[in-house]
Image (spheres, rainbow, N blue to C red):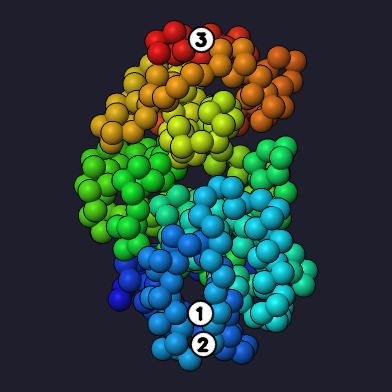
């Protein structure tokens, strides 16, 4: 089967992201060149195991690769110390050595947790990401950020550990509930908004067909997103500068996720989409871009049937001051100013510490009043 390849050219840690429909069935043949002995350990979650583990196992069998598997409970709660130590102990029990491979088969939770386990077992074993959600295919499986949540917050413990290979099988997206697909789409839109106006325009024209299942459009959107992420990660692997652009919409998102208790009231990708709309609205209020730009962002999200504004989040939200306090926890406040990703237009985001807290407070208060 044909696939696209995006190369992440990091010195000493270069790897390919293969993107296409049917890659899971071919996983064994893509993985075998990386093995010194034909043996791997797979970690997945129970939901993904039910849908896709047998296909992966059959393809490993066909390539003569021995394998064992651990299925963790599905959901964000898995991404903590308890399941992390379970995964680490299991990898050790399976006698995985430094030159062996661990496979992360699942969405963002599995990718982040297994990547972190691989980073610390024997001071680093190699791992392959097989992302099964749109969010994982376009964001979390690429770029080497791994980690878990703690009682203090999300992703607070982790490591940069680049995978050896990423296999993004776009046909797996057909098994996603529509809400999860659209949440992942929030991260896809983010790429257009932060750095590629032509891609955003393509999404405006093709997003609905892509959501409806068009596989060529899904392949293109995942590929373009991965190219953009790879390009930014190659410039700034450990987020000293430009990688922060990938956090467009995320300061608003993290505050809204905290305010909704990281519950199903708001999925991460939904928060990213709302956060991007708010970031563009703030940019317009600061005179950085015209008012048409946030209107266009909101129009596209609405056309996709996505959450657009604070009024689309069910249940109570705290007041503007409390939301601002949650944002300040996420990003440092300097002399009453927040560090943000703002935009001079669609496809032209930049990092700035020059956002007055008053402007953000005013916008949030107006948005809350419209609920
Ligand atoms: N998800 C943001 C990053 O990988 O930097």
Residue positioned 67% across, 73% down in the render: 91
Residue 43 is drawn in which quadrant? bottom right
Disc 1 packing (10 Å; few <14; some 14–19; many ≥20): many
Q: Dot 3 lies on which element? A: helix
Location of residue 148 with respect to 291 vertically, above or below:
below
Discs 1, 2 touching: Cβ within 8 Å: yes
Q: Dot 1 lies on which element? A: helix
Give the spatial CA distance, label 3 vs label 2.
Answer: 58 Å
Give the spatial CA distance, label 1 vs label 3.
Answer: 52 Å
Mark number for residue 31? Answer: 1
Pointer 1 or 2: first along the chain: 1
Please state which of residues 140 and 342 is positioned toward the viewer in this rendering.
Answer: 140
Mark number for residue 365? Answer: 3
Whether residue 224 sits left or right of residue 124 in the image: it is: left
Residue positioned 67% across, 72% down in the render: 90
The answer to whether residue 202 of the structure is visible from this angle is no
Pointer 1 or 3: first along the chain: 1
Residue positioned 30% across, 76% down in the render: 1
The answer to whether residue 317 of the structure is visible from this angle is yes
């Amino acid at each position: 089967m044909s696939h696209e390849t995006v190369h992440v050219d990091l010195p000493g840690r270069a790897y390919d992201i293969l993107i296409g429909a049917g890659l899971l069935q071919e996983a064994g043949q893509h993985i075998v060149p990386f093995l010194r002995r034909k043996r791997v350990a797979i970690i997945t979650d129970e939901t993904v195991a039910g849908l896709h583990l047998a296909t992966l196992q059959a393809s490993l069998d066909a390539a003569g690769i021995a394998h064992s598997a651990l299925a963790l409970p599905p959901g964000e709660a898995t991404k903590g110390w308890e399941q992390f130590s379970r995964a680490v102990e299991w990898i050790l029990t399976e006698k995985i050595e430094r030159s062996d491979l661990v496979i992360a088969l699942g969405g963002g939770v599995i990718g982040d947790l297994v990547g972190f386990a691989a980073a610390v077992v024997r001071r680093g074993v190699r791992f392959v990401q097989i992302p099964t959600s749109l969010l994982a295919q376009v964001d979390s499986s690429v770029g080497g950020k791994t980690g878990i949540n703690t009682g203090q917050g999300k992703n607070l413990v982790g490591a940069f550990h680049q995978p050896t290979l990423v296999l993004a099988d776009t046909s797996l997206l057909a098994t996603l509930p529509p809400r999860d697909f659209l949440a992942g789409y929030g991260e896809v839109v983010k790429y257009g908004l932060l750095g590629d106006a032509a891609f955003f325009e393509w999404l405006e024209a093709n997003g609905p067909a892509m959501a409806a299942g068009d596989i060529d459009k899904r392949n293109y959107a995942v590929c373009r997103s991965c190219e953009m992420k790879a390009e930014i990660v190659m410039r700034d692997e450990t987020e000293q500068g430009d990688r922060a652009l990938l956090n467009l919409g995320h300061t608003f998102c993290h505050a809204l996720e905290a305010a909704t208790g990281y519950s199903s009231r708001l999925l991460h990708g939904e928060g990213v989409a709302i956060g991007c709309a708010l970031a563009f609205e703030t940019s317009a209020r600061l005179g950085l871009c015209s008012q048409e730009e946030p209107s266009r962002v909101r129009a596209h999200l609405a056309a996709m049937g996505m959450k657009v504004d604070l009024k689309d989040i069910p249940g109570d939200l705290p007041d503007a001051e409390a939301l601002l306090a949650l944002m300040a926890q996420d990003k440092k406040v300097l002399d009453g100013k927040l560090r943000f990703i703002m935009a001079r237009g669609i496809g032209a985001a930049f990092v700035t510490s020059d956002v007055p807290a008053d402007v953000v407070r005013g916008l949030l208060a107006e948005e809350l009043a419209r609920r």
